[in-house]
Amino acid sequence: MNNDVIDLMDFRKEKGNNNENPPMGGDGGDGMEARVAKLETHVEHIREDIGELKSDVKELRKTIDSRSAWLIGLVVVSILVPIALKYWG
């Protein structure tokens, strides 16, 4: 057997667990149930934050679109007014 590979059965025997199947049920040991609950809470807060960010981005797009329209209008007018004054002024 390659020295870089660890046989799972040998590892379990060293740790004192000769069962082929890991124990089932319970909280998974080491307070896993509490840690998972904490992670779920964090994920819920992250989802709320992402929802807020999405609405903020929508508002920014509307603002940028309206400002872009004004800017384009000002550029067009600033070009057309001197041309019109040259020919009809």
Image (spheres, grey):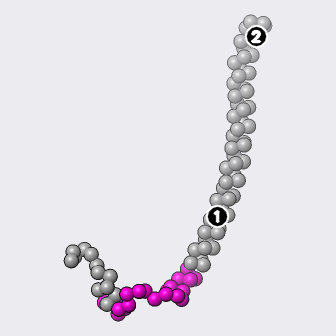
Residue 31 visible in image:
no
Q: Position of residue 52 (x, y in %)?
A: 69, 58
Could you give the CA–CA distance between mark 2 and mark 1, rounded to whole angstroms? 57 Å
Q: Position of residue 54 (x, y in %)?
A: 67, 54
Q: Position of residue 7 (x, y in %)?
A: 29, 81
Q: Is residue 31 left or right of residue 18?
A: right
Which disc, if any, is residue 85?
Answer: 2
Q: Main secondary structure of the magenta part?
A: loop
Magenta residues, start to end: 14-35
Which one is in front, 30 or 70?
30
Which disc, if any, is residue 47?
Answer: 1
Residue 45 visible in image:
yes
Q: Is residue 8 left or right of residue 86?
A: left
Number of residues whose C-alpha sits closer than 10 Å to that of mark 2, classed few (under 14), some (14–19) or many (20 or more): few
User: Which amino acid type is marked by label 1?
Assistant: Arg
Identify the residue at image location x=65%, y=68%. Answer: 45
User: Which amino acid type is marked by label 2?
Assistant: Leu
Residue 85 quadrant = top right
Identify the residue at image location x=78%, y=7%. Answer: 89
Q: Is residue 61 left or right of residue 23?
A: right
**Image quadrant where one finds the N terminus:** bottom left
Number of residues whose C-alpha sits closer than 10 Å to that of mark 1, classed few (under 14), some (14–19) or many (20 or more): few
| Above or below, 84 relative to 20 | above
Which one is in front, 31 or 85?
31
Q: Position of residue 47 (x, y in %)?
A: 64, 64
Is label 2 or label 1 in front?
Answer: 1
Q: Is residue 5 magenta?
A: no
Q: Tell me how many marks there are.
A: 2
